[in-house]
């Protein structure tokens, strides 16, 4: 989005120089061609700004098109004041307006770095700023021809090089954005849209600390849902449950689809009581959702296993194993419940005291 507008902007700026050049060979019409060239160039820089907004923000805004009134206003002011007959006045008005639009483009690129931080934004913004400064220097050289004419000439040619640099960094921005989105897709589960197991593993620390919790979550009787209503219906329920769980976790938590109808949640520094209470809240949220399938109402319930680190440090894998054992204990006890892992309840991975389940 925006590349087409940027190309049009560059084309119109190039046409501006061509029109002004043609005017030199047509005596009596040079002012007409000069004004036409100036208008085309200003429209080109306005469209350039519009294209940079689209490229940087990746969204459309109808109000942005109002920038096209700026070339009209500048040209009308020159005509109304009679300054259109003065090449110096035309050049100064053109260069200062173009510089303003370039500075605005650079500001847009940098401001959007907050929502989409990409390394190439900085050199792109710097290139645009340099082009804006060089454009202003051209105006300065024209305003003070006796002292700065060489500056204007050199700045004009240097600004052309800067425009090539801008085009290069724009393409680099598109490339970086594409790579970033691909990396994001690699970490997402295609069906549910939540992080996948690979993404979860990359964020999970190897060593967990006291109070950290792992919650294993399983949708009860999911195979029965698939058998009775079809896999598409099952996928719909799976995705809905996944989204409901994902939107309710804390910002510091990590959540993922672990496989099949199973999910995993890592909660750092939450503590035993809060982990159990939070898991119970998730159970209630999911069980309160009704799904309409073939004119029937389906309610999904969850079985959960919770393991909370009660040592100073432990390995994440051992905590996952404990949460998995607690999950299977929930299933063995009738499902639609959560079990908090306690060492005394399990011997060699076998349940010993089901009465102690939450």
Image: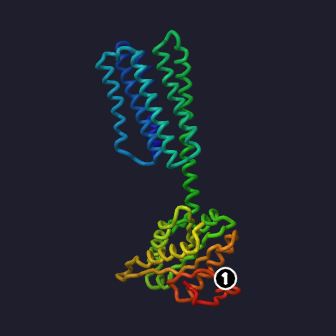
Residue at horizontal 51%, vertical 75%? 277
Q: Please state the horizontal and vertical placement of residue 218, each as a whole percent of the image.
A: 54, 79
Vertical relation: 44 (above or below) 252: above
Left or right side of 262 for 85: left
Question: Dot 1 corresponds to which residue?
Answer: 343
Residue at horizontal 28%, vertical 19%? 80
Q: Please state the horizontal and vertical placement of residue 136, each as a whole percent of the image.
A: 48, 23
The colour scheme of the drawn protein is rainbow
Vertical relation: 95 (above or below) 250: above
Residue at horizontal 49%, vertical 20%? 138
Picture quarter containing residue 50?
Answer: top left
Q: Residue furthest left?
A: 80
Vertical relation: 104 (above or below) 54: above
Give whichever of 314, 325 is nearer the camera: 314
Q: Residue furthest top?
A: 146
Q: Please state the horizontal and vertical placement of residue 248, each as a whole percent of the image.
A: 48, 67
Left or right side of 267 for 16: left
Picture quarter containing residue 326?
Answer: bottom right
């Amino acid at each position: 989005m925006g590349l087409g507008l940027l190309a049009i902007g560059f084309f119109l700026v190039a046409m501006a120089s061509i029109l002004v050049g043609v005017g030199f060979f047509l005596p009596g019409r040079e002012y007409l061609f000069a004004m036409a060239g100036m208008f085309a160039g200003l429209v080109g820089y306005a469209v350039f700004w519009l294209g940079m907004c689209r490229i940087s923000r990746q969204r459309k805004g109808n109000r942005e098109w109002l920038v096209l009134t700026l070339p009209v206003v500048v040209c009308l002011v020159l005509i109304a004041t009679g300054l259109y007959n003065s090449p110096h006045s035309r050049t100064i008005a053109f260069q200062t307006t173009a510089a303003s639009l370039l500075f605005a483009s650079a500001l847009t690129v940098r401001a959007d770095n907050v929502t989409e931080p990409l390394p190439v934004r900085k050199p792109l913004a710097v290139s645009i700023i340099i082009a804006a400064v060089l454009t202003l220097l051209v105006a300065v050289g024209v305003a003070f021809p006796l002292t700065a004419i060489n500056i204007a000439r050199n700045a004009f040619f240097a600004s052309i090089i800067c425009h090539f640099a801008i085009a290069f960094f724009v393409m680099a921005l598109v490339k970086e954005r594409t790579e970033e989105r691909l990396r994001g897709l690699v970490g997402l589960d295609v069906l549910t849209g939540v992080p996948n197991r690979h993404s979860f593993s990359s964020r999970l620390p190897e060593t967990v600390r006291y109070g950290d919790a792992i919650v294993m979550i399983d949708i009860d009787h999911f195979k029965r849902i698939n058998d009775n209503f079809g896999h598409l219906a099952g996928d719909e329920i799976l995705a809905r449950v996944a989204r409901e769980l994902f939107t309710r976790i804390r910002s510091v938590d990590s959540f993922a689809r672990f496989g099949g109808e199973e999910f995993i949640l890592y909660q750092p520094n939450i503590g035993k009581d809060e982990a159990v209470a939070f898991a119970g809240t998730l159970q209630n949220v999911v069980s309160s959702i009704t799904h309409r399938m073939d004119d029937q109402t389906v309610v999904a319930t969850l079985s959960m296993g919770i393991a909370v680190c009660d040592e100073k440090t432990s390995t994440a894998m051992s905590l996952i194993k404990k949460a998995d054992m607690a999950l299977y204990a929930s299933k063995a006890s009738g499902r639609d419940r959560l079990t908090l892992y306690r060492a005394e309840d399990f011997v060699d991975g076998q349940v010993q005291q089901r009465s102690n389940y939450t």
